[in-house]
Image: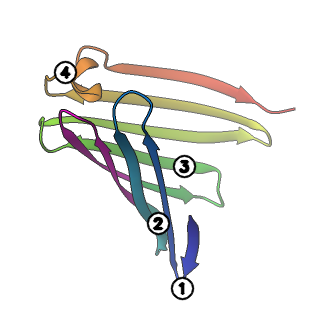
Amino acid sequence: FETVRGQWGVRGEAAMFVETHTTFDGGVGVDRRAGEYRIAANVLVSHGPEDTDVTLVGAADRSFARDTRRLRMFAAYDPADGTAFVRGIAAISLRDDVWIEGSAGVFGGSSPDTLGRLTRHDFAYARLKVFF
């Protein structure tokens, strides 16, 4: 589902898999504009025969200088396993349809969950984007 109430966007999704083991994956999230920022928060739940896993996700972005500069932040956190991921993205428009972008992401914690398995996979990149 997805709906809007005032300044808030609200969305959710759920899936149940019953073929071999009964499992459930679902989540709910909200987003809105807060001043110059666009913010979003989500709670994701995965429940299987052995355990239940909860992941908290947040994001914020902001544009500057008549939308020729952009900053984005993204974070995911699994409170049960103590694992996290944080990513920042910065982009600058050099001229119409030409952007240079840089990003870095860091994983923290160590566990068998999705975030924990990526602990040694931190990254950084820069790229030139040309639209035509």
- 45 is within the stretch colored magenta: yes
Q: How far apart are the two marked residues, 1 and 4, measured between alpha carbons?
A: 40 Å
Q: Closer to the observer: label 3 or label 2?
A: 2
31 to 129, vertically: above or below: below
Q: Which residue is mark 2?
A: 31
User: What is the quadrant of the C terminus in the image?
Assistant: top right
Q: Closer to the observer: label 4 or label 2?
A: 4
Q: Which residue is mark 1?
A: 6
- Amino acid at dot 1: Gly
Q: How far apart are the two marked residues, 1 and 2, measured between alpha carbons?
A: 11 Å
Query: Could you tell me which residue is drawn at 36 percent across and 44 percent down?
Result: 24
43 to 126, vertically: above or below: below
- Is the C-beta separation of discs 1 and 4 under 8 Å? no
- Amino acid at dot 4: Pro
Looking at marks 3 and 2 on the same chain, the residue that comes earlier in the sequence is marked by: 2
Left/right placement of residue 127 relative to residue 21 reads right
User: What is the quadrant of the N terminus in the image?
Assistant: bottom right
Q: How far apart are the two marked residues, 3 and 2, measured between alpha carbons?
A: 18 Å
- 54 is within the stretch colored magenta: yes
Label number found at residue 112: 4
Q: Classify mark 2: helix, strand or loop.
A: strand
Looking at marks 1 and 2 on the same chain, the residue that comes earlier in the sequence is marked by: 1
Q: Classify mark 1: helix, strand or loop.
A: loop
Q: Closer to the observer: label 3 or label 1?
A: 1
Q: How far apart are the two marked residues, 3 and 1, measured between alpha carbons?
A: 25 Å
Q: Nearer the viewer, residue 13 or 126?
A: 13
Q: Which residues are magenta?
A: 41-59
- Amino acid at dot 2: Asp
Q: How far apart are the two marked residues, 3 and 4, measured between alpha carbons?
A: 34 Å
Label number found at residue 70: 3
Looking at marks 4 and 2 on the same chain, the residue that comes earlier in the sequence is marked by: 2
Left/right placement of residue 38 relative to residue 74 reads right
